[in-house]
């Protein structure tokens, strides 16, 4: 039984945040490059959504990786993270094209990334970062 991850709460937080990161990266890749994106995404609000999602995706991905390295076993990270990475394209491919490649999908992605960020902070990722960089 030693091979099973003892910290189920941290594994659940990691799985949720990493799932949002993987699906978000796939959705953002679908609207890039901007010259090939639909017209509404090339507008100023669409460009803002792409920039905001890209920045928040980088922050959430970094925070997720930092959190999982500090809280989980390597075997749990590889198995859970790999499974989520492999499954996420199949979850996003069935979304309607207007949602995948439009401003509505980008707005929902921004909300999901904000929720994942809040989940990580609630789970204690912020305190882990502060304790890693401060000496007591």
Image (cartoon, grey):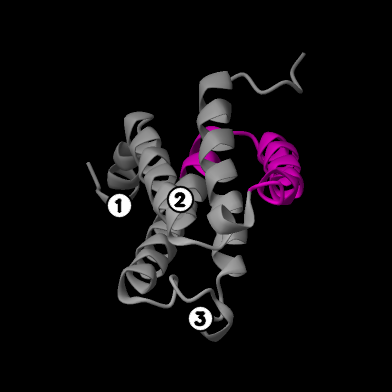
Image side of residue 47 versus residue 5, left or right = left
For label 2, the SS is helix
**Alpha carbons under labels 3 and 2: distance apart:** 17 Å
**Residue at the disc numbered 3:** 34
> Which quadrant of the view contains residue 57?
bottom left
Q: Residues within 10 Å of mark 2 (few under 14, many from 20)?
A: many
Q: Earlier in the sequence, mark 2 or mark 1?
A: 2
Residue sitting at the far left: 136
Q: Tell me residue 71's x, y (percent).
A: 51, 33
For the point 59% across and 35% down, the residue is 15
**Residue at the disc numbered 2:** 109
For the point 54% across and 53% down, the residue is 99
In the picture, the quarter occupied by the N terminus is top right
Query: Is there CB contact under 8 Å for labels 3 and 1?
Result: no
Q: Tell me residue 48's x, y (percent).
A: 33, 69
The magenta segment: 67-95
Rendered view: 80 above or below 97: above
**Alpha carbons under labels 3 and 1: distance apart:** 38 Å
Q: Earlier in the sequence, mark 3 or mark 1?
A: 3
**Alpha carbons under labels 2 and 1: distance apart:** 30 Å
Q: How many marks?
A: 3
Rendered view: 59 above or below 91: below
For the point 69% across and 43% down, the residue is 91
What label does residue 133 carry, if any? 1
Residue 35 in the magenta stretch? The answer is: no
Residue sitting at the far top: 1
Q: Is residue 7 visible?
A: no
């Amino acid at each position: 039984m030693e091979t099973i991850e003892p910290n189920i709460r941290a594994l659940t937080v990691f799985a949720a945040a990493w799932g949002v990161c993987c699906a978000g990266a796939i959705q953002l890749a679908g609207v890039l490059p901007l010259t090939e994106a639909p017209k509404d995404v090339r507008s100023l609000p669409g460009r803002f959504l792409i920039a905001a999602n890209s920045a928040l995706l980088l922050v959430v991905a970094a925070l997720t990786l930092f959190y999982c390295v500090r809280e989980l076993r390597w075997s749990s990270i590889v198995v859970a993270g790999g499974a989520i990475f492999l499954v996420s394209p199949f979850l996003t491919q069935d979304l309607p094209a207007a949602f995948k490649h439009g401003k509505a999908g980008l707005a929902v992605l921004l909300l999901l990334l904000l929720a994942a960020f809040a989940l990580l902070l609630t789970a204690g990722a912020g305190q882990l970062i502060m304790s890693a960089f401060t000496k007591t």
